[in-house]
Amino acid sequence: MYMPPQFNTKDAGHARELIRQNPFASLISTDDDGLPYVTHLPLHLLAASEGQGDSDGAAAAEMLLLGHVARPNPHWRYLLARPQSVVTFLGPHAYMSPSVYPDLARVPTWNYLAVHCTVQAQVIESFEDTDALLKHLIADHEPAYAQQWRDLGEEFAQKMVRGIVPFTLRVTQLQCKLKLNQHRPESHAAMYASYAAGNDDQRALAAWMQRLGMLPDDDATSA
């Protein structure tokens, strides 16, 4: 994606946090006609290390995404034929009014947080590996369901598993974009005040402004 340097974070922890907080992703592959094919789906992130990477490649090398599609969805066949794909995650986003500036010669924009991953896909075939993958997703979204899944019995579980195609997506390249008007410090105090009083996405962006040290301590702690 277009990545001006002021929005390009090299901290892999930022990417991991955004993925875990916003796991509903877009998986983008190439179909048999050479066109983009997109499936929207939840993914689970496995990270071998929580340390920061020194580069996009170093950070990506420790990340694995787990997911599945319905067997009638042809996407898994595209993953078999062309394993390299792209996964995108969109975090909080919101309109920014030009009223946050101290002068009038300004224009509005949109602030957002996003992660793009280039991935190498591998389809999972065994029931045991599929069951393990499903337990990761259950733990993410409804841990209490784990007991119900176990109680359904192996015969029923085998039948359900045959209806999906699970896969791993090994991250080979990582981009994390934090677009928060960092290069316009004259807007930060008013932008923070507006976002902090806004909807869920706006309040989340205000929290990221604090996390990135975009405000003097007195502004960040007085809200």
Image (cartoon, rainbow, N blue to C red):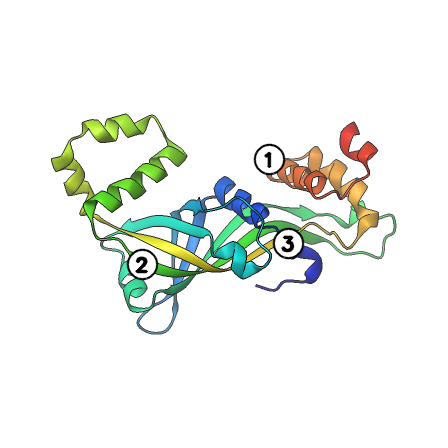
Decide: few, some or many residues near mark 2? Use Cα within 10 Å; few <14, some 14-19, many ≥20.
some
Q: Which mark is residue 9?
A: 3
Between discs 2 and 3, the one toward the N terminus: 3
Of residues 218 and 99, which is closer to you in this image?
218
Question: At 20% across and 49% down in the image, what residue appears?
Answer: 126
Taking the view exactly as shown, the residue that stands out farthest to the right is 103
Tell me, for residue 122, which label it has, or none. Answer: 2
* Measured Cα–Cα span from mark 3 to mark 1: 23 Å
Side (left or right) of 104 relative to 78: right
Tell me: residue 146, above or below residue 104.
Answer: above
Question: Where residue 200 is drawn, which disc sits there?
Answer: 1
Q: Quadrant of residue 139?
A: top left
Q: Separation of disc 2 and disc 3 at Cα?
A: 28 Å
- Point out the residue furthest to the left here: 155
Residue 134: % across, % down: 30, 40
Label 2 SS: strand
**Which quadrant holds residue 170?**
bottom left
Image point 67% across, 37% down: which residue?
207
- Mark 3 lies on a secondary structure that is loop
Where residue 127 appears, as percent x and y from the top left, is 20, 45
